[in-house]
Image (spheres, grey):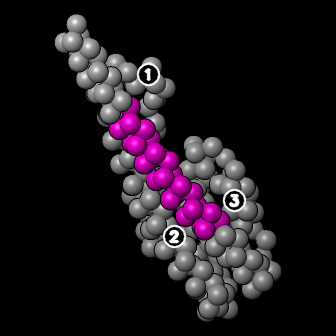
Amino acid sequence: MEILIAVVVILAGWIAIMYNGLVRKRNYITEAWASIDVQLKRKTNILTNLVDTIKMQTKYESETLEKIIGMRAKIMSGSKDEVMAANDSISKMIPSIMAISESYPELKSNQSFLHLMDDVKNVEDKIAYARTRYNTAVVEFNTAIQSFPASLFAGMFGFTKENTYEITEEEREYSDNIRISKL
């Protein structure tokens, strides 16, 4: 009888340790997503200021600028998938913003514009880093819930597979084929 109680206690302890490990991994995902979210909100603020600067300098209302404003709303309130899709769409529009500056020499020499463009590059780098951290946390979590013996209990405790965020095939092709002359 004592052996049976010891086995039950050991099994319960092992399940508790496994459960706590999965909770910790899921919390790492939440924290990593929060890092992405902070940078995306920063990016939308920078792009809003950039659009305002372009409008003030050029009196130019373009489809690109309006699309950026529209994507901002999706970044601020969408699901993870919608947020990442909107971010990727905005990132593809940045060369168009650079093209606008080429047409307006006064914009190209505007310190606010130049500073904001540097901020855009900086935030893009931070988003890429945060996305990498997020994907690493997701892979570790997914591996944990799919590995034996945790896989036996993960579903029972409500742990489900999370999605990583990678660039789409279209974006990969775009980035592979972009040339400075196209900016």
Q: Which mark is residue 123?
A: 2
> Reading the chain from its start, which is encountered first: label 2 or label 1?
2
- Tell me the residue at 40%/25% (across/down): 154
- Tell me the residue at 70%/71% (across/down): 48
SS at mark 1? loop
- Tell me the residue at 61%/87% (across/down): 108
Q: Is residue 71 left or right of residue 20?
A: right
Residue 81 visible somewhere in the drawing: yes
Image coordinates of residue 146 in percent, x first then y, are 33, 27
Q: Mark 3 points at which residue?
A: 72
Q: In this view, does 144 lie above or below 101?
A: above
Q: Quadrant of residue 15?
A: top left
Image coordinates of residue 168 in percent, x first then y, are 47, 46
> Residue 34: within the magenta?
yes
Type of the residue with mark 2: Val
Q: Which mark is residue 155?
A: 1
Residue sitting at the far left: 3
Q: In this view, does 180 lie above or below 85?
A: below
Q: Count of labels shown?
A: 3
Residue nearer the viewer, 107 or 152: 152
Q: Is residue 100 left or right of residue 84?
A: right
Residue nearer the viewer, 17 or 182: 17
Type of the residue with mark 1: Gly
Residue 88 visible somewhere in the drawing: no
Q: Residues within 10 Å of mark 3 (few under 14, many from 20)?
A: many
SS at mark 2? helix
SS at mark 3? helix
> Reading the chain from its start, which is encountered first: label 1 or label 3?
3
Image coordinates of residue 106 in percent, x first then y, are 67, 91
